Image (cartoon, grey):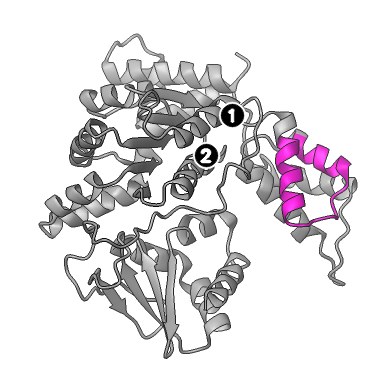
């Protein structure tokens, strides 16, 4: 049955963008398919509702194509894989389910019950599959050290930051997988900060905050992805207490974020202080050599032999934003090269015709002016205020952000 589920995910992957696929399918877990009912594990009821909104038609089509028309979906809320736990579920008549849980308090994680815990680690994200280069070598070395020396508190917490798509999630997941391999008794949990926030909101609503906190306090290696999504003051408050408890027991705390702690706004000072206790490392965008290596790695692993070296070089020279964009470019080139006969013919002429249309097609030249406009838009601030002599704290903070981004992403 697992093969059917894998086929279903492959069918869905062909119908939607890589971004949508990675966002919505990674937390899903296949449980069973019996008597026309497909049981799927999810992290929260809100996740199920939002996923259905985003993938309604393609998700339904993929299920029908693989499991048969008329298949019903039943969600299973879970963080702990206890088969006897009434973690909550929702029966539906069609795969485009709206979440209607049987158990009203099911949204929060449950305390350990002696069963293996679902860690939500993507098993593709191993150290062996991580392409290393100058931009990520230091982060990789520290990640390997953390995985190998679980009791060493030198790098605890490990705060890894960098722009989207450069491999942060891959690297911290690799730590979790390595720990699980060598210490299967350890409770390792990967959770997106947005999911953590949603779980906490559900816990408050259902008066289960103590259960929520207790569950997280039992984790041996806690991996929080996209920490900038923590946001709300109350969520920060509960995370602060979980952090303190885990730290006092010398448990591992691993965090990814799109910015360093020093660039945070609206985060409690005491929490910021704790985030700086261990080590803070960044991953930069890949350089040319690493971009070539990433492309070659994808082509080799997927047994794609239709890419001449000059096409690989051209993509590497013209696509520089992220690992994700590089890998997506290979898929796009394959799609564009398919003629009526279905035969692939990829050459440098096709690359030069297609790549400029796909990369930075609508992107303006990045300079201080565009950065200032971007910051003003995000901060809901007038450009005249940014250029004025006012020393109001929000304006000063915005100016600092402009300087930081200009220094980081331009030649200025």
Task: Give the magenta-colored segment's residue range.
Answer: 291-316
Which quadrant of the view contains residue 27? Answer: bottom left
For disc 2, the marked residue is 171
Look at 22% across and 72% down and name the residue there.
86
- Labelled pair 1, 2 in contact (Cβ < 8 Å): yes
Q: Is residue 382 magenta?
A: no
Left or right, 313 with respect to 368, comes to: right
Lower sequence index among marks 1 and 2? 1
Left or right, 38 with respect to 233, comes to: right
In percent of width and height, residue 61 lies at 54, 78
- SS at circle 1: loop
In percent of width and height, residue 212 lies at 19, 52
Report the disc number at residue 136. Answer: 1
How far apart, in angstroms, are the residues tagged by discs 1 and 2? 10 Å
Query: Among all residues in the image, which is located at the extreme left?
Result: 207
Vertical comparison of 233 with 279: above or below: below
In percent of width and height, residue 72 lies at 41, 84
- SS at circle 2: helix
């Amino acid at each position: 049955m697992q093969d059917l589920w894998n086929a279903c995910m492959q069918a869905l992957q062909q119908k939607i963008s890589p971004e949508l696929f990675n966002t919505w399918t990674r937390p899903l877990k296949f449980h069973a398919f019996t008597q026309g009912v497909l049981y799927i594990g999810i992290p929260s009821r809100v996740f199920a509702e939002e996923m259905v909104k985003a993938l309604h038609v393609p998700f339904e089509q993929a299920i029908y194509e693989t499991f048969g028309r008329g298949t019903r979906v039943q969600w299973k809320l879970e963080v702990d894989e206890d088969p006897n736990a009434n973690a909550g579920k929702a029966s539906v008549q069609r795969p485009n389910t709206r979440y209607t849980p049987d158990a009203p308090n099911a949204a929060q994680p449950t305390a350990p019950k002696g069963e293996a815990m679902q860690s939500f680690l993507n098993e593709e994200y191993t150290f062996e599959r991580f392409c290393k280069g100058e931009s990520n070598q230091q982060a990789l070395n520290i990640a390997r050290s953390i995985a190998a020396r679980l009791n060493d508190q030198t790098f605890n917490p490990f705060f890894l930051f960098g722009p989207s798509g450069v491999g942060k999630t891959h690297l911290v997941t690799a730590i979790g997988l390595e720990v699980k391999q060598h210490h299967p008794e350890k409770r390792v949990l990967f959770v997106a900060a947005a999911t953590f926030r949603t779980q906490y909101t559900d816990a408050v609503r259902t008066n289960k905050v103590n259960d929520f906190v207790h569950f997280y306090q039992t984790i041996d290696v806690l991996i929080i992805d996209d920490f900038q999504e923590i946001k709300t003051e109350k969520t920060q408050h509960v995370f602060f207490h979980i952090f303190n408890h885990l730290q006092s027991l010398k448990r591992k705390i691993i965090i990814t974020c799109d910015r360093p702690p020093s660039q945070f706004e609206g985060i409690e000072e005491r929490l910021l202080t704790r985030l700086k206790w261990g080590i803070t490392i960044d991953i930069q965008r890949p350089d040319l050599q690493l971009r070539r290596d990433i492309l070659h790695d994808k082509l080799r692993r997927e047994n794609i032999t239709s890419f001449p070296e000059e096409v690989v070089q051209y993509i590497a020279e013209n696509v520089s934003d992220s690992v994700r964009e590089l890998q997506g470019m290979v898929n796009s080139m394959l799609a564009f090269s398919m003629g009526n006969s279905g035969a692939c013919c990829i050459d440098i002429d096709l690359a030069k015709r297609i790549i400029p249309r796909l990369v930075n097609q609508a992107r303006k030249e990045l300079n201080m002016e565009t950065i200032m406009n971007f910051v003003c838009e995000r901060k809901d601030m007038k450009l005249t205020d940014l250029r004025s002599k006012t020393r109001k704290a929000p304006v000063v903070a915005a100016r600092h952000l402009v300087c930081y981004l200009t220094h980081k992403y331009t030649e200025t």
